[in-house]
Amino acid sequence: MSVRKFLIPALIAVPALAAGAYAIVSSNAGTSGKAAADKDTPAVVQALVREGLADLRPFDTGTELRGFAGMAEQHPVALYVLRDGTAIVGTRIDADGKPMDVERVSHLIAEPTSEAVWSKLAASTWVQDGKADAPRVVYTFSDPNCPYCNRFWEAARPWVDSGKVQLRHIMVGVIKADSSAKAAAILGAPDPAAALLQNERHLASGGIAPAPGVSPDIARTLDAHQQLMTELGFRGTPGIVYRDDEGLIQRVNGMPRPAALASVLGPR
């Protein structure tokens, strides 16, 4: 019987994993081959790596338990191997009933994961909105027909216009039938930044005219952007990614609340 049938119920029972733990198989599963092949890695850990537990890193529990931090569907996971070779996936609780290792596991996983995600975003075909030397970069998955993307664009103007923030729009076509053609019009324009500006300024009256066709190259780009958006857990637009004060990535689904704008865009 597949070990996944045991792993998934255990993950669902752990509150810290949230909804993302329902599907353990992730697109990053292949990155843990080294851990799976390491002869010092317990067999049960290697089995879980084959089932999709990714980016495993050992940590000291201060007990006979062997601790491992990993990723399941973009969420940190704590794994404890017992003396008999079996393992428990979950959160340790101390004598006072408080969770243990949560911060340690998060930091072990969050830093390298943040770098990997940031690199993927940087490698996408984004449209620059703001000065090239702005000290803060914020990525946003944007659909040309999305009114909430437009609201975020408008709300960010004081930060962008002052040179404090550069928005990088990763165009997708997911809302309307002509969204892909409008995204193609922006990405295929001689000056994509100017085309994006035209769309945002005139969205209320229809925005940019759709391209007469979507070239194969732009179609592949839009497909890759949509796949990346899904990998990062976004189901709609805008999907916003930024670095916090510790350099770790944070994600915002949808238009941020006014009180949260400073967290996303920094001090005004």
Image: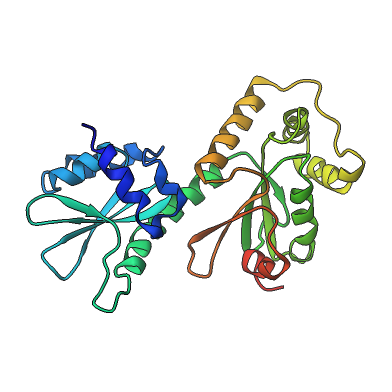
Residue ranking furthest to the bottom: 96
Instruction: Decide: is 54 above or below 15.
Output: above
Q: What is the basis of the colouring in this image?
A: rainbow
Q: Nearer the viewer, residue 6 or 110?
A: 6
**Residue 81 placement: quadrant:** bottom left
Which quadrant would the C terminus be assigned to in this image? bottom right
Q: Relative to residue 170, is residue 145 drawn left or right?
A: right
Instruction: Decide: is 104 above or below 242.
Output: below
Residue 198: in sight, yes or no? yes
Residue 53: in sight, yes or no? no
Q: Where is residue 39 in the image (x, y as percent from the top left)?
A: 11, 44
Q: Relative to residue 215, is residue 221 drawn left or right?
A: left
Q: Which of 103 and 131 is in front in this view?
A: 103
In this figure, what is the number of numbered marks? 0
Q: Relative to residue 145, is residue 120 drawn left or right?
A: left
- Which residue occupies 28% across, 44% down? 7
